[in-house]
Image: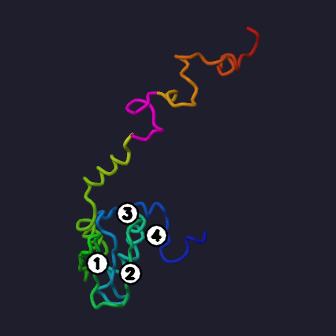
Amino acid sequence: MPFMRGPAPIRRTVKYLEAGRLYFKDQIKILTVNYNTHGQSHQGTRDFVFWQLPQIQYKNPQIQISTFKNLTPTPFIRAFYDTGDHMLIDVDGKTNEEIYEHLIRVIGKSQAVLRAELVAKEKKDNPANFGFGCDRHCICEISGQVPCPGVCPLPNHMRGKYKYKKGDD
């Protein structure tokens, strides 16, 4: 398979991309990562860009993420808010995991907010839903559907006991 070539092809699998835990707050619109391709103090940032950035992009498609290489003496991450403000995060000498955990704490949504969004997303106000706890008890209440057999009996050609009858019994 062609997508399984290159360095660490596991990064391009959906299972790996969905394993990310960082959901940015709604106010963040742009994230920039500045680092060098050489130097020991930049190693954690290079690993972060290589391993975690695809997951972050997958989980936050509405956010623009840019990387700038070889433009700075020390690595840093800058988050721009929709108000025009920005936050500068120093990642000099930190490991990949330390950077990721710090971003989750600082600019990520909390677990309570994520649970509340999940509940709101599963809300049962979809007009296609019917049954207990929804707007409609039965699908027969929608116009164009066959009425309930309890209210109006179905014609014999639509009933299984007549349709699949084996003989003239």
Residue stretch in magenta? 125-137
Identity of the residue drawn at 25% across and 83% down:
92
| Residue 60, image quadrant | bottom left
Q: CA distance from mark 1 to mark 3?
A: 20 Å
Say which residue label 3 marks: 20
Identity of the residue drawn at 42% across and 60% down:
18
Contact flag, marks 1 and 3 (Cβ < 8 Å): no
Q: Amino acid at mark 2?
A: Thr
Say which residue label 4 marks: 11
- Mark 1 and mark 4 lie on one chain; the one further toward the N terminus is 4
- Mark 4 and mark 3 lie on one chain; the one further toward the N terminus is 4
SS under mark 2: strand
Contact flag, marks 2 and 1 (Cβ < 8 Å): no
SS under mark 3: loop
Q: Nearer the viewer, residue 102 or 10?
A: 102
Which secondary structure type mostly characterizes the magenta part of the structure?
loop
